[in-house]
Image (tube, grey):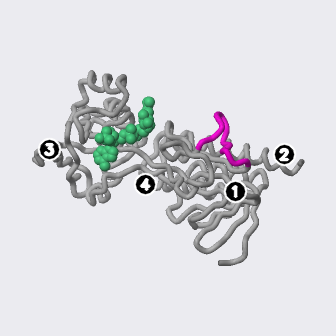
Amino acid sequence: MSDIQREKVLIIGSGPAGYTAAIYAARAELEPVMLAGLQFGGQLMLTTEVENFPGFPEGVTGPDLMEMFQKQAERFGTRVLMEDAIRVDFSKRPFQVETESQKFEADAVVLATGASAKWIGLPSEQRLMNQGVSACATCDGALYRDKPMAVVGGGDTAIEEALFLTRYAPKVTLIHRRDELRASKILAERARKNEKIEFAWNARVAEVLGDEFVTGVRLEDVHSGKTRDIVVEALFIAIGHEPNTGIFRDQIALDDTGYIKVDPGTSRTNVEGVFACGDAMDPTYRQAITAAGRGCMAAIDCERWLAEEEAG
Ligand code: NAP
């Protein structure tokens, strides 16, 4: 391990939240260092076409968008390191952050580690990712206009996604492993009343069908084990998200589901000098543009806090 590096601002995570925080912090001459992680770029790296990010009327691919974020952050002096933070200590100042190869001390830290969609775990699901398999109806639904689609899950997200997809799809099959929804009554009722939504109860996805693109889904009845195939051209997995906050567990306040708690309307965590933005603190909106907005808030909060600290 090399000598400890002292930084003013360390940003952990490299999705839209982290990069926006970096752009603002760099322009404020805070010379931020970003630990972008080995899987840099966040969830947008798993998306093909992004059509709802303002400023791109023709759409942009997720990886292209993230490359632009990175260039813009670097242009103003952000140092981007493709390393994962593996240990943090926020109990004393300067804060300590470690990667496999380096130790950092930082006056302020911005947490932007995002969240990961949960997947079913089938090889066919992995193989057909972005070829019909997606974890975001808002992002990808319009790509499959006029095609039959399916959503897996029985929570609020699954129902919201199924309802959203009825704008485009002639039919949406909601695949749920039980015969009762977990979703709130109002959403469940709305889905039941929607003629385009069909329910596949007590069903699990045994296989996603298709060579290059999704052509269907093999469903298995959880009780009888019987299988049947349905024709769909898109499969949206909506079985929950997990915030990537494991390494912060004993360091800052998290809610019951692991999301970072912030003071309402700010990016301030319960540790002064540690700020949070993006999907790691937002279970509700989870959009690139809202994460970017939160990243901007974190950089501004951070800059003001550092100025106050310096002024004593
Ligand atoms: P969730 O409430 O945890 O629901 C996940 C769903 O996926 C459950 O129905 C679960 O089945 C199913 N599931 C989990 N693992 C599975 C697997 N391996 N295979 C098949 N099915 C699986 O997650 P969420 O719907 O993303 O919601 C997360 C939180 O955000 C919730 O608190 C929710 O209320 C909130 N939210 C609110 C709104 C809103 O109010 N408009 C919108 C979206 C989200 P079981 O039911 O059998 O466990």
Image-based side of 274 in relation to 17, left or right: right
SS category of the residue bearing label 2: helix
Element type at marker 3? loop
Question: Given this view, does label 1 or label 3 mark the residue nearer the observer?
Answer: 1
Is label 4 or label 1 in front?
A: 1
Of circles 1 and 2, which is in front? 1
Residue 60 x/y as whole percent: 48, 48
Q: Which residue is mark 1?
A: 91
Q: Residue at x 29, y 55 (%)?
A: 125
**What whole-number distance in Å separates the C-alpha atoms at marks 4 and 1?**
35 Å
Q: Which residues are magenta?
A: 261-272
User: Amino acid under label 3?
Assistant: His
Residue 223 - label: 3
What separation in Å lies between label 4 and label 3 (alpha carbons)? Answer: 34 Å
View quadrant of ligand 1? top left
Q: Which secondary structure lies at badge 4? A: helix
Residue tagged by mark 4? 46
Dominant secondary structure of the magenta stretch? loop
Amino acid type of disc 1? Ser
Mark 1–mark 2 CB contact (< 8 Å): no
Which mark sits nearer the N-terminus, 4 or 1?
4
